Amino acid sequence: MVPIGGGKPQPYVMYEYACREGDAGIPNSLRGTQVELAKQKEKAAIPASSTTSSLVGQTEAAIREKFGKPATIAGPRWEYNTTSVGDVVYIYFVGGKVTSVRPVDLPLDQIAKTP
């Protein structure tokens, strides 16, 4: 018995509480890990020479020849759309040459070519 507010003792009542989210949380987490590992294996199978990281060091003219006109030019950054909905490739130039790209591991055939 537990006294409440200094009054007479009241019986202690224990309520059961169970969260059922945990039942699905672990299998979902494991499934997500398996999907991520499969993506990593797929990326590892693609040679680095056919990913966006291979663009570093190329000139503006070479990039235009490969992919056409960029969707957007914002200062030193060119943006190209991809074949996936909503994805964008960012190519950064300094002195007329590519210094970095984002994402670095996207296959070149995923960049949408423009006329």
Image (cartoon, rainbow, N blue to C red):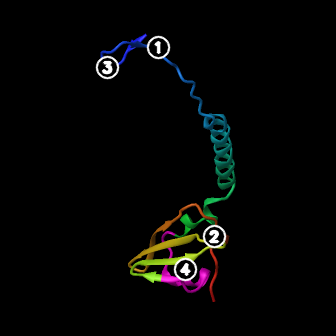
Q: Name the mark on residue 63.
A: 4
Which residue matches tag 1?
11
Q: Amino acid at mark 2?
A: Leu
Q: Residue at x 59, y 29 (%)?
A: 18
- Marks 4 and 3, how far apart at CA: 77 Å
Q: Secondary structure at mark 2?
A: helix
Q: Count the labels in the image.
A: 4
Secondary structure beneath dot 4 equals: helix
Residue found at x 69% / y 53%: 42
Q: Are marks 1 and 2 in contact (CB under 8 Å)?
A: no
- Report helix, strand or loop for mark 3: loop
Q: Which residue is mark 3?
A: 5
| Up-down relation of residue 51 to residue 26 (above or below) | below
Rendered location of residue 62, percent (x, y): 55, 81
Asked if residue 25 lies in the magenta stretch, the reply is no
Counting residues from the N terminus, which is met first, the one under dot 3 or under dot 1?
A: 3
Q: Nearer the viewer, mark 1 or mark 4?
A: 1
Amino acid bearing label 4 = Ile
Instruction: Estimate how packed mark 1 is, as few (under 14), some (14 to 19) or many (20 or more) residues with alpha carbons within 10 Å.
Output: few
Alpha-carbon span between mark 1 and mark 2: 71 Å
Using the image as rendered, state which of residue 17 and residue 53 is in the foreground.
17
In this orientation, which residue lies closer to the viewer: 3 or 114?
Answer: 3
Q: Amino acid at mark 1?
A: Pro
Residue corresponding to mark 2:
108
* Tag 3: amino acid: Gly
Measured from the top left, where is residue 104 in percent x and y? 53, 62
Q: Residue at x 68, y 43 (%)?
A: 31
Counting residues from the start of the chain, the first of labels 1 and 2 encountered is 1
Q: Are marks 2 and 4 in contact (CB under 8 Å)?
A: no
**Quadrant position of residue 23:** top right
Rendered view: 39 above or below 9 = below
Look at the numbered discs 1 and 4 and tell me whether their residues touch, using CB distance below 8 Å. Answer: no
